[in-house]
């Protein structure tokens, strides 16, 4: 990554981390309802992968989606407002934490049926192909989703039709609370690519630049008509599956082993060590991010609630061209 | 022009394909010509980009159509039979039906899904369901079940203008039936029931093939001096209650007729709306003539007996009027 991109990536990772800390805090205070799945520890995945995309490229993701939304350029205000269920939220307060939609940034939603959105990602790429566009779609999913039938159907179709899509598996080792070795005959997810005659690659998901490089290569191939790629980023969820999770299924020793691999301090040290950034610059970013998150919370607090009329008018899109 | 239900659908698909963003996709719709020959010859005429054969992956292909629609293309999916749509139930119910609402109205899913419903060909329990009613329970979907060639064409033409997922159940036993169809673009609105036959004594309410069976029942009733009005619902979601209420306010008696068993259908919901909203117009209970709630049997005689017939419908009407 060059200096400019690096600073932007650092900003985004720091923003996601602080945003998630704040979201967890507000959840504890009862300001945010439902389920809340934090992305803490996995920031390098969304930020590194999305840094390899153009603004017009599509992203579709799972329910742990705050990081993808922020990395795709959705404002912290509108994402926080969505978590608060407010009308100014990215989905007007009707979607919630798991269903963030920013079509203007080509974030086509977070989805809460595990694996169900993977073939929709194939479909976005099918649409790109049919419309003759020079675009790519990245689909994010977890290691749990690869045992859903939709994973198989989506990768097979994408390969048969050589579609411009990158399948990005965030392998955090646990499907909710079940370790991957207890559920998957083949635990190296990237090897499944072989079954679909597409490239598969495993990358260090705690290294934002490694993620960026691998995704950039896959995206370039997809854009050039080379078809899909399966990427597997090895990462770790520092928090539980959701706020209700006491994390009884993994050891404190394992968690301690992953702590030093935290992607944010690692990237910070590298930027300072190779002179891409100064301490003052990074501190300034951290200050900016703090202000941005405080502002987002204030915005969400002050925003109006949606109305039942908003709900009723969003079941169907109005048919402007329908015949009488 | 007198054409078959199949030809009417073919004409509509040709109209749809004039839009360059439209493409057809489904299992065996191309080289094979479609399991019910609806797209026969289309691959040669339009090429593989417009007429796409897909893997046997119902969940995947319907989901792919959802995504393509979200990206601005306009997919027209054929799922070989309605029984197989259950493999895409997640795609349709959890995704297609929810995306507009849970995005706060910001993302549209323009998707047309055609599939084939019905029993009566000794195909066994897994190929003989009429489960369009399941989909008619789902907010976010529009569900159509045409009975005539004109409606099969007109509703499909209208579906192209819908920015919402539209589920169309075509009945296999109707593909070779003929009817008058306007050769010009004859749109049929997606929200209006039609009066297939006017009458004054009793209203028979049905959709898909049962609307045609009700026409035969109405002939039997006419022989006994009873004037039956036959309503074809055409659209199962949203329900056109106005047309139904108007008819019942005239006849004061009604029979709801469905090929599928009670509880897997939209008939119960319709009956509930009638009793709640226009109870005073009724001079007797609404009779509900439906298929038996069984896995449809293979045996030819038993299969026929498991669904309503002109006789059983006429008998129910007589019993209601005598009571």
Image: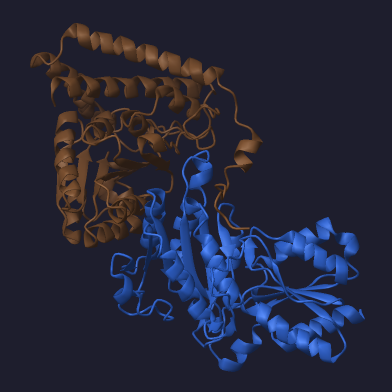
Chain colours: A brown, B blue
Residue A218: x, y in percent? Answer: 17, 44
Q: Is residue A181 visible?
A: yes
The residue at 86%/65% (across/down) is: B249
B231 left or right of A146 in image: right
Q: In which quarter of the image is the N terminus of chain A?
A: top left
Residue most extreme to the left: A274
B118 left or right of B18 in image: right
Q: Quadrant of the C terminus of chain A?
A: bottom right
The residue at 87%/69% (across/down) is: B250
The residue at 57%/92% (across/down) is: B300
A258 left or right of B268 in image: left
Residue most extreme to the front: B184
Residue B118: x, y in percent? Answer: 55, 78
**Residue B14 location, quadrant:** bottom left
- The foreground one among B307 and B161 is B161
- The foreground one among A235 and A103 is A103
The residue at 14%/35% (across/down) is: A213
Q: In this view, does B9 lie above or below A314?
A: below
Q: Is residue B308 visible?
A: no
Q: In this view, does A32 lie above or below B141?
A: above
Q: How many labels does the image show?
A: 0
Residue A178: x, y in percent? Answer: 34, 45
Residue B81: x, y in percent? Answer: 47, 74
Q: Is residue B83 above or below residue A10?
A: below
**Residue A153 location, quadrant:** bottom left
**Residue B35 location, quadrant:** bottom left
A315 left or right of B274 in image: left
């Amino acid at each position: 990554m060059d200096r400019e991109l690096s600073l932007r990536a650092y900003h985004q990772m720091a923003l996601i981390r602080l945003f998630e800390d704040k979201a967890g805090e507000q959840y504890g205070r009862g300001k945010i309802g439902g389920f809340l799945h934090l992305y803490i520890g996995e920031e390098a995945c969304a930020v590194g992968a999305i840094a390899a995309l153009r603004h017009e490229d599509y992203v579709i993701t799972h329910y742990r989606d705050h990081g993808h939304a922020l990395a795709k350029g959705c404002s912290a205000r509108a994402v926080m407002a969505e978590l608060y269920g407010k009308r100014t939220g990215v989905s007007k307060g009707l979607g919630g934490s798991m269903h963030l939609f920013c079509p203007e940034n080509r974030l086509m939603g977070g989805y809460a049926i595990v694996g169900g959105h993977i073939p929709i990602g194939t479909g976005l790429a099918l649409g790109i192909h049919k419309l003759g566009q020079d675009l790519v779609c990245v689909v994010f999913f977890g290691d749990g989703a690869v045992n859903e039938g939709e994973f198989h159907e989506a990768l097979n179709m994408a390969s048969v039709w050589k579609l411009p899509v990158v399948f990005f598996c965030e392998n955090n080792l646990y499907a909710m609370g079940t370790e991957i070795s207890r559920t998957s005959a083949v635990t190296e997810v990237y090897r499944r690519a072989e079954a679909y005659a597409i490239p598969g690659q495993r990358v260090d998901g705690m290294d934002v630049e490694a993620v960026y490089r691998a995704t950039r290569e896959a995206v370039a191939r997809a854009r050039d008509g080379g078809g899909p790629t399966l990427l597997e980023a090895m990462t770790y969820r520092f928090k539980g599956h959701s706020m209700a999770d006491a994390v009884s299924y993994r050891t404190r020793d394992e968690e301690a082993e992953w702590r030093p691999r935290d992607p944010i301090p690692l990237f910070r040290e590298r930027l300072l060590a190779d002179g891409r950034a100064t301490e003052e610059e990074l501190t300034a970013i951290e200050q900016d991010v703090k202000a941005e998150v405080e502002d987002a919370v204030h915005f969400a607090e002050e925003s109006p609630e949606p109305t039942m009329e908003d709900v009723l008018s969003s079941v169907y899109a109005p048919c402007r061209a329908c015949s009488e | 022009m007198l054409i078959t239900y199949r030809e009417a659908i073919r004409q509509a698909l040709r109209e749809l394909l004039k839009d360059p963003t439209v493409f057809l996709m489904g299992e065996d719709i191309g080289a094979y010509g479609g399991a019910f020959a609806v797209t026969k010859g289309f691959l040669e005429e339009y090429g593989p980009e417009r007429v796409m054969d897909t893997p046997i992956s119902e969940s995947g292909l319907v989901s792919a159509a959802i995504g393509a629609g979200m990206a601005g293309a306009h997919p027209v999916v054929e799922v070989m039979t309605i029984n197989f749509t259950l493999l895409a139930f997640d795609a349709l119910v959890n995704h297609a039906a929810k995306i507009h609402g849970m995005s706060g109205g910001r993302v549209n899913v323009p998707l047309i899904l055609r599939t084939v419903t019905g029993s009566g060909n000794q195909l066994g329990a897994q190929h003989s369901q009429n489960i369009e009613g399941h989909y008619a329970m789902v907010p976010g979907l529009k569900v159509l079940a045409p009975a005539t060639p004109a409606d099969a064409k007109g509703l499909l033409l209208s579906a192209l203008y819908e920015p919402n997922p539209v589920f169309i159940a075509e009945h296999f036993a109707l593909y070779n039936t003929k009817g008058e169809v306007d050769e010009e673009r004859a749109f049929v609105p997606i929200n209006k029931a039609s009066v297939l036959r006017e009458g004054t004594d009793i209203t028979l309410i049905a959709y898909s093939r049962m609307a045609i069976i009700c026409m035969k029942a109405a002939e039997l009733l006419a022989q006994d001096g009873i004037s039956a009005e036959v309503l074809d619902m055409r659209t199962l979601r949203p329900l056109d209650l106005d047309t139904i209420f108007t008819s019942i306010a005239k006849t004061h008696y009604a029979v709801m007729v469905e090929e599928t068993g009670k509880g897997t259908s939209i008939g119960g919901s319709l009956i509930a709306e009638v009793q709640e909203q226009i109870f005073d117009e009724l001079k007797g209970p609404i009779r509900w003539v439906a298929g038996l709630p069984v896995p449809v049997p293979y045996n030819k005689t038993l299969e026929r007996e498991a669904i309503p017939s002109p006789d059983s419908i006429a008998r129910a009407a007589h019993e209601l009027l005598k009571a």
